[in-house]
Amino acid sequence: MANSITTIVRPVKTEADLEAEKLAQVRTETAADADGLIEGMKLLQAMHDKGLLEILVALFDRGDKVMNKLVDILSTPGASNALQTALAAMQGMSKIDGTAVAKSLDGLTAGLDRVANADIPAKPMSVFELMKQLKDPDVSAALRLGLEFLKGFGHAVRTGDNSSQH
């Protein structure tokens, strides 16, 4: 008859076996997340090309000194006001309609192009010339938009409300 098994001998993994398992796991994870890894490598390369990676490495190497300097700068009275102003500006910018800004910047660009190419006569504009200009649809549209802006601005300043009521 056969002898009974009293001990179980489990195979012991060598360093090479453990390393092979880790490499297989890395290969599997890399294949699963390939798109993200490729984008991450592109980001790292762009940061390297612009010199930002070196700055970040230096920042982490000297982290304690940088933090101490940052705390010193932020503890000054002016820095607190500047930080509050920057936060208020960011909050305000988040409320601005991007389409309106794009349209306004297009108008600003077109207006600046006209100014750059304009020949301004030496004599002042008469009241009659001004009245004639008001009949120009572009001048009229610009004045109407300017007045709408002033209405909204005045309402917000006067009431402390930034909703667009007329």
Image (cartoon, rainbow, N blue to C red):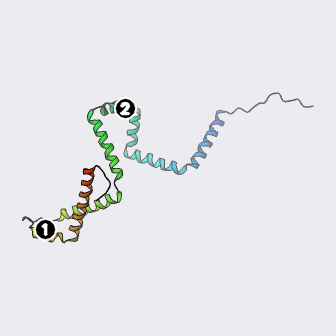
Q: Nearer the viewer, residue 48 or 163?
A: 163
Q: Residue at x 8, y 64 (%)?
A: 124
Q: Nearer the viewer, residue 73 or 161?
A: 161
Left or right placement of residue 114 versus residue 87 in this view: left
Left or right placement of residue 11 versus residue 114 in this view: right
Identify whether 161 is placed above or below 3.
below
Circle 2: residue type: Met
Q: Quadrant of residue 2?
A: top right
Q: Secondary structure at mark 1?
A: helix
Please name the residue that numbered disc 1 is placed on: 130
- Residue 145 screen position, x and y as percent: 25, 63
On residue 67, the disc is 2
Quadrant that contains the N terminus: top right
Q: Quadrant of residue 130?
A: bottom left
Q: Residue at x 34, y 54 (%)?
A: 96
Identify whether 118 is placed above or below 18.
below
